[in-house]
Image (cartoon, coloured by chain):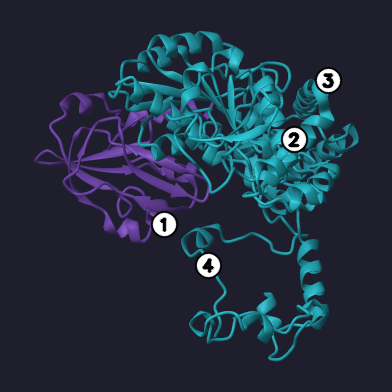
Chain colours: A cyan, B purple
Amino acid sequence: MLIFNYSKAGRKTGSQSPNVSADTLLKSLPANSLRKSKLLLPEVSELEVVRHYTSLSKKNFSIDTHFYPLGSCTMKYNPRICNELAMLPGFLNHHPYAPLQFSQGLLQSLYELQEMLKEVSGMQGISLTPMAGAQGEFAGVAMIQAYHAARGDTQRKVILVPDAAHGTNPATAMMCGYQVKEIPTAEDGDVDIQALQAALGPDIAGIMLTNPSTLGVFERHIHEIADLVHQAGGLLYYDGANMNAILGKVRPGDMGFDVIHMNLHKTFSTPHGGGGPGAGAVGVGERLLPYLPVPVIGCNTDNQYYWMTEQEIPSSIGRLSGFMGNVGVLIRAYIYMRLLGRAGMPRIAEFASLNANYLQAKLKQLGFDMAYPKRRAGHEFVLTLKRQAKTCGVNAMAFAKRLLDKGFHAPTTYFPLLVPECLLIEPTETESKGELDRFLEAMAEILHEAETNAELVLGAPYSMPVQRLDDVRAAKELDLVWKAD
Amino acid sequence: MTMIPDDLRYTKDHEWVREEGDGEYTVGITDHAQSALGDLVFVELPEVGAEVEAGVACCVVESVKAASDVYSPLSGEVTEINDALVESPELGNSDPYTEGWLFRLRSDDTEALDALLDFDEYVDLLAAEED
């Protein structure tokens, strides 16, 4: 039921109405600016509103209610304190056009966030302005483009993307007008160096890499790759999707990357996954400093913070939003990082990896097959149900649906594409051993069900508000808009 | 069981090629490919008259699981596309070798043609991927 379906003409919620009469408010507007038709809003009582949204909220399957091991997404807990502090009136009610002398606290927070991100990424400059990961990626590749263009190096039309890179990378390269060439993965999960060497040439603008890759393994030849790409005149782009695995341990700048975007909504624990908005800060090495998107926060010799714009960064790729990114989200990330401190950062990576490796080792013992059984997991790992799909007819999708019945959000399914019948499992550092053990129990139960009663698993889920969705119809006849009769 | 007609040629990326005579070839995706992709919901085909290059992506097939590029098995010019498949992508699932064809092309690319897999080689490839 939609809230509109409860609508009865004349019903309203008096206590929430403005206490100034509408006539008084509207008197100052010219007649031609006033709408003639009625607003198409539902006419419902306060109690109906409360019941409707409370019952919707109870259907949420979220990090606040369930373990959410969605690989490649870092669905970690968002500490309430970050939210609480970001809601302080000084942050919340600040107007973006407020004069600088009234903005010093906010600007200082953002400046310090830039500095901390520089430190953890090993880059020389940071811009916080991208509104989400996709825009961060766009900004990163646009800077690579601007760099080559400024050198008159215009024949570079191709971006290399390993098939184990984050799934969004080819789309970003295409969006920026590049052709995409895929680089295969070697048998051990690392980039196929020979294939990379064969692909490199004067037409290569750069490579987009995720490390650890979407296979959950750390690329061990990253220095060699960086040298090869740089020798060919290309630049290296680091997708920050999996930064949680290396936070405070290894820095992309030290690996040889020229540009990076960081999903603050993943690694730095701001709300995401339908609950966004996101924040996709970009970091650059020396070569790309002149192209950073504006505004960037500067600090002058009098310790006054200010907006650096096109005047100071004339070769900037420009602005990505009206003001500067999603400031409320940036503030949450800032508070999170301040609370962790220098000592806390590496603990994130340590526990994220420990949790992933614990699950991987235990699942192996339970009889599950890993895609890369000889490799240690980063913060996530890929399990393949190819054998179970063949022997019991129970595929990865059925396992994922059955997990919902057992009280767990499903891991990422059928991604990365190069592993058949896979689950990509990322527990994050915020789960306790007890919770991980409950997940293992559920996986063992489902495996047993698959072997003894496949029908049961194939019919799952049984406990959700809806059962199996019609994926085909949803994709072909997507209909998200309510229309009045 | 996956269906593999013995009168077609194949690529290692699971496309099939049927020789129509007069240098014309029909291209589609194999039964194995459609089954791995799952229910198809969207197909993007090249334009008639487009020049395609062997081994370079020229179509996109999108299923409920993923969007995948389809690579042209041969270099040549596209002479016809399967409009019915664009309207009803599910034909690619139900009938990958006949109703579900993707496009036809005119080609004199004998080098790429010779490099295509025959029935036995494709069977071996699938068996190797199964392991």
The amino acid pointed to by label 4 is: Asp
Separation of disc 3 and disc 2 at Cα? 16 Å
Asked if badge 4 and badge 3 are on a common chain, one would say: yes
- The mark found on residue B90 in the picture is 1
* Residue A62 against residue A110 in the figure, above or below: below
**Where in the figure is residue A145, as x and y percent of width and height?**
39, 28
For the point 55% across and 17% down, the residue is A190
- Residue topped by disc 3: A343
At mark 3, the secondary structure is helix
**Element type at mark 2:** helix
In front of the other: label 2 or label 4? 2
Query: What is the spatial separation of the Cα atoms under label 4 and label 3, in whole angstroms?
Result: 48 Å
Give the distance between the C-alpha atoms of the residues marked 1 and 3, in whole angstroms: 55 Å
The answer to whether A414 appears left or right of A233 in the picture is right
* Residue A399 seen anywhere in this rendered image of the structure: no
- Circles 3, 2 touching at the beta carbon (< 8 Å): no
Position of residue B11 relative to residue A474, above or below, is above
Task: Tell me the kind of residue under disc 3.
Answer: Ala
Subunit that carries the residue with mark 1: B
Name the amino acid, label 1.
Answer: Glu
- In front of the other: label 3 or label 2? 2
Give the quadrant of the C terminus of chain A. Answer: bottom right
Q: Please tell me which of labels 2 and 4 falls first in the chain.
A: 2
Asked if labels 3 and 2 share a chain, the reply is: yes
Tag 4 residue: A479
- Nearest to the observer: residue A479 or residue A461: A479
**Chain at tag 2:** A
Q: Quadrant of residue B7?
A: top left
Decide: is A394 above or below A177: below
Q: Which of marks 1 and 3 is in front?
A: 3
Residue A442 image point, x, y percent: 81, 42
Labels 3 and 2: the sequence-earlier one: 2
